[in-house]
Amino acid sequence: MPHAAQVVAPTTAERVHSACAHADSAMLALPGLDPVPTSVHLLRQCGDIVVAVPMNSTAAGLVLGCGPNGSPAVLELTDQAPLDLRERVRALVWLRGWAHLVPSHAQRALAAAVAADHPHPALLDVGHTSTLLRLVIDSAVVADTSGADSVDRDRLRDARPDPFCAMEAGWLQHLQADHADVVDRLARRLPHALRRGALIHPLAIDRYGVTLRVEAIDADHDVRIPFEHPADDLESLSRAVHALAGNPFRGGVHRI
C-alpha cells in the first residue's frame, strides 16, 4: 500500500493566519482614498478581521456613509522577521472584502473581546481617538519569495495559525544571539554553492520545519528545511530542530 505524501509546509490558509498574527503593521485601502494605517488588527475565526482606524479619519467617515452594505476594502499586512536582516519582510498578505463600521454601542464590547486574544495597548483608544471596523473577508492572498498564493474565505475560516506562532519571535532571536552553532549546522544542509560567501539567519520556525534566510552577494534566498514529522508540542519541536541540526539530511531541501 503506498504511503501518504508527507506534509512539509503549512497550507496557504495557515500561512495567512500566521502572517496576520505576526504582522505589526497593516494598511487599509478604500475606494478613492489613500491607504490608512491601522493601529489594531485581529483575524478572527468567524471570517472577519477587526481593525482600528482614527475616529476622525476619512476612512471611518466613508465606511459610515456606506451604511449596512459596507464599503469594498483591501487590508495589506506586513510580516517582518524579528531579526536585524538586510530585508526584514518575510511575507505580505492582502485580505479583500467589505468593511463595516462597528456600531458605537458595541465598540467597547468588541474591543474587550479582541483584547482577550490580542491584548494590544491601542485598544484603550477605542471610543476615544479610534474606532473599530470589521472587514468581512471574501478572499486572501499571501506572497513571499516563492510567489503568491490565494485562498477563499471558507478555507480561511477552517484554518488556524501555527501552534507555535506566539513563541516564534523569541526562539528566532535566541537562535540568532546564542546558538550560532545550531544555525551553522542547519546551514550545512544547504547546497555549498548557495551558502558560499553568504550570511545565513534563522528566518522562521513552524510545526513543519525551519526556514533559513541566505543573504548572498547577489540576492536573498529563503530556504525551507522540513522536519521528518510535523511537531505537535514543544518537546517534539525541540527534538525535530535538534535532529535537523545533528543528523544527515534525508528529506531534501525545499526552496520557498
Image: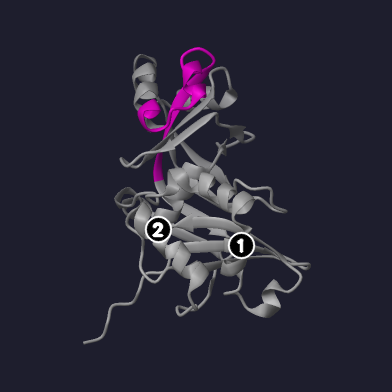
Badge 2 marks a residue whose secondary structure is helix
Q: Classify 10 Å Cα crowding around label 2: few (below 14), some (14-19), many (20 and above).
A: many
Name the outermost residue toward the bottom.
Answer: 1
Do the residues under discs 2 and 1 have CB atoms within 8 angstroms? no
In the displayed structure, would residue 240 be above or below residue 191? above
Name the outermost residue toward the left.
Answer: 1
Residue at 60%, 73% in the rendered image = 188
Residue topped by disc 1: 181
Q: Find out whether residue 123 is within the magenta segment.
A: yes
Q: What residue type is labelled 2?
A: Leu
Residue at 59%, 58% in the rendered image = 202
Residue stretch in magenta: 114-137
Q: Please tell me whether mark 2 or mark 1 is closer to you in this view.
A: 1
Residue topped by disc 2: 237
Distance from the alpha carbon under mark 2 to that under mark 1 = 18 Å
Residue at 54%, 15% in the rendered image = 129
Residue 169 at what x, y percent from top left? 53, 45
Q: Quadrant of residue 243?
A: bottom left
Q: Does residue 140 appear in this view?
A: yes
Residue 139 at what x, y percent from top left? 42, 51
Badge 1 marks a residue whose secondary structure is helix
Tell me if 121 is positioned left or right of 237 in this view: right
